[in-house]
Image: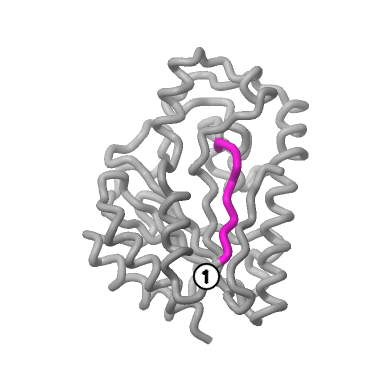
Amino acid sequence: MPYRVVPGAPESPVILHVPHASRVLTRAARERILLDDAALTAELDRMTDAHTDVVAARVAMEAATTPWRFVNRYSRLVVDPERFPDEREELRAVGMGAVYTRTSHGAPLRAEDPDHARELLATHFEPYATALADLVDDRLAATGRAVILDVHSYPPEPLPYELHGTGPRPAVCLGTDPYHTPAALLDTARPLFARCGDTALDTPFAGCYVPLRHYQRCAAVSALMVEIRRDTDLAPLVDALTELVNSCGTP
């Protein structure tokens, strides 16, 4: 399976989603990537949200009520589960839709091959999306709601692929959705993460992940993206995220 589900407490509505922490490629994906080993290592260094899985694990360990974790087993260079799989994805313009064909610097990553892209979507993207949507349904059935906290990181300096890289790059960026990010969640999160340094909304990255099954259809699913600038001290970040999980876990 392209994902790993780490169960939390039966009464917890919270899902910590970690989509970009892995550097692992499948053999089939590696064979199609055009980069040599050194260039691939450099690209993984740039594009991997290193240690976000560790952050999520520490938060789960310290939270009063253990949240659920949904973790991508593979690198986003196999498929990126957080992209739209169709023309709605704006990063398709730079070759970085759900299946990347370009690197973060615009070099060819894999050949344009619609059949290969469809295969990757069928074997990785779709099972991942279905399993995460099923987990959300499970939390809805058990608790009446689901809270997805999407854990990411980003470099201090913008990478060439970023379409909105000229904006502020705070210590913590909180990504929101007008339908799925309630004011109460944001009002709780902002002062907590302010302890980690400057914070901002939806810059340099915007939005938050909600499964397409629930996207703009189910208001009981709330979501917030937590983007950590990679030079930010992780200790206060873990504390802040743990407090947010505790708050979200309270009926």
In the foreground, 23 or 210: 23
| Magenta span | 68-76
In the foreground, 125 or 107: 125
Q: Give the residue type that dot 1 points to.
A: Thr
- Residue drawn at x 52%, y 39% as measured from the top left: 22
- Residue drawn at x 45%, y 37% as measured from the top left: 48
Kindly identify which residue carries mark 1: 66
- Residue drawn at x 37%, y 44% as measured from the top left: 154
Quadrant in the picture for residue 155: top left
Is residue 69 in the magenta section? yes
- Residue drawn at x 63%, y 68% as measured from the top left: 216
Q: The N terminus is located in which quarter?
A: top right
Quadrant in the picture for residue 230: top left
Q: Residues within 10 Å of mark 1 (few under 14, many from 20)?
A: many
- Expressed as whole percent of the image width and height from the top left, the position of residue 103 reads 48, 26
- Expressed as whole percent of the image width and height from the top left, the position of residue 34 reads 57, 15
In the foreground, 161 or 120: 120
Residue 63 vertical placement versus 208 (above, below): below
Seen from this angle, which residue lies furthest top?
Answer: 36
Give the left or right position of residue 120, taking residue 106 as reference. right
Coloring applied to the structure: one colour
Mark 1 falls on what kind of element? loop
Seen from this angle, which residue lies furthest front?
Answer: 61
- Expressed as whole percent of the image width and height from the top left, the position of residue 163 reads 42, 40
- Expressed as whole percent of the image width and height from the top left, the position of residue 152 reads 44, 50
Residue 161 vertical placement versus 181 (above, below): above
